[in-house]
Amino acid sequence: AGAGGGGLRLNFYSQSCPRAEDIVREQVRRLYEEHGNTAVSWVRALFHDCMVKSCDASLLLETTTTVVSEQASHRSFGMRNFKYIATIKAALERECPATVSCADVLALAARDGVAMLGGPSTLPMRTGRRDSRESYYGVVERYIPNHNDSVSTVLSRFAAMGVEAEGAVALLGAHSVGRVHCFNLVGRLYPAVDGSMDAAYGEYLRGRCPEAEAPEDTREVVYARNDRETPMLLDNMYYRNLIAGRGLLLVDQRLASDPRTAPYVRRMAADNAYFHQRFAAALLTMSENAPLTGGQGEVRKHCSFLN
Ligand code: HEM
Ligand SMILES: [Ca+2]
Ligand SMILES: [Ca+2]
């Protein structure tokens, strides 16, 4: 792994599918208007795809006789809306069959989702990624950080993608939108509320998650908003919450106290424009992690299945 993105370029489809980026944007907007949380999903999905080997749409493969889906990992818990990737891809296939890769669909959808959520817009996202021929379930299990991992672990995983500490702090700002299930929270609430958590916030979360044991099941269990104040806005409220002891996951809260990350938390808490600038830069770096290009991999017809 590692940064680079050699072989990617701006507007890769300008000849082969000139409207590709417009089509993705139209579909992302339409889906956002129907189900606002689709935009949230694209941002998390890009992280999970890019951190596992490469931004190669390995995450999108579904389980078959030959593939174990990365989506089946515990680390993918709570991920949703994958079926709407097929909606975006189908719109592209109608105009340009077998041309635009699923890896680029995901990257462009995340970019446009960020804009829908009031995050930085008009990011110069390069394209030309190709799709993997495999799924890397085992890598997901070993490599995607857990909700209670140390700052050292988190920083080293981002560093392997060419994202330095400040960029990692900025990317975790994606937790300014979306939700967390009680399964990932109860460890901080029972038997006692974690000492690094604001007491009133702890009481509120115990109300959201009244049982000390929460099943790992997204169908029925309750969850808490990542950010109560502006749950659908990709803004710096996340950092202001961390400083107030209202971080949701242990990894989030640790960013505010670790000397390697705390200065960035303070700076981003104080300045939303600065957060957006750092988020944009780090998202682009992450989106170019070790892509397959040229004749590598394939361009999938259906994002969920190998050709
Ligand atoms: C140390 C790194 C990270 C860890 C341990 C982590 C962990 C988690 C966990 C446990 C959840 C909640 C799952 C659930 O209970 O439903 C979550 C949600 C989310 N994460 Fe992260 N995350 C990390 C980094 C990132 C990054 C870098 C991004 C994007 C740039 C991101 C975007 C999201 C989003 C948008 C959600 C909300 C999803 C939804 O509401 O459907 N996360 N993350
Ligand atoms: Ca991948
Ligand atoms: Ca927010």
Image: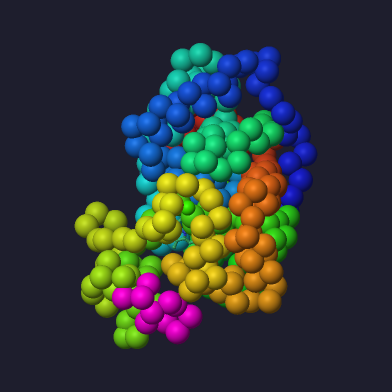
Q: Nearer the viewer, residue 244 or 297?
A: 244
Q: Position of residue 269 (x, y in %)?
A: 60, 61
Q: Nearer the viewer, residue 160 or 222?
A: 222
Query: Is 196 contained in the magenta span?
Result: yes
Q: Position of residue 45 (x, y in %)?
A: 49, 47
204 displayed left or right of 140: left
Please tell me whether residue 237 is drawn above or below residue 120 in the rendered image.
below
Please tell me whether residue 79 is drawn above or below residue 293 in the rendered image.
below
Q: Which residues are magenta?
A: 193-203
Please tell me whether residue 79 is drawn above or below residue 189 in the rendered image.
above
Q: Position of residue 235 (x, y in %)?
A: 53, 51
Q: Residue at x 51, y 14 (%)?
A: 95
Q: Position of residue 239 (x, y in %)?
A: 55, 62
In which quadrant of the rendered view does residue 88 lie? top left
Q: Residue at x 73, y 55 (%)?
A: 162
Please tell me whether residue 254 is drawn above or below residue 7 in the rendered image.
below
Query: Is 261 contained in the magenta span?
Result: no
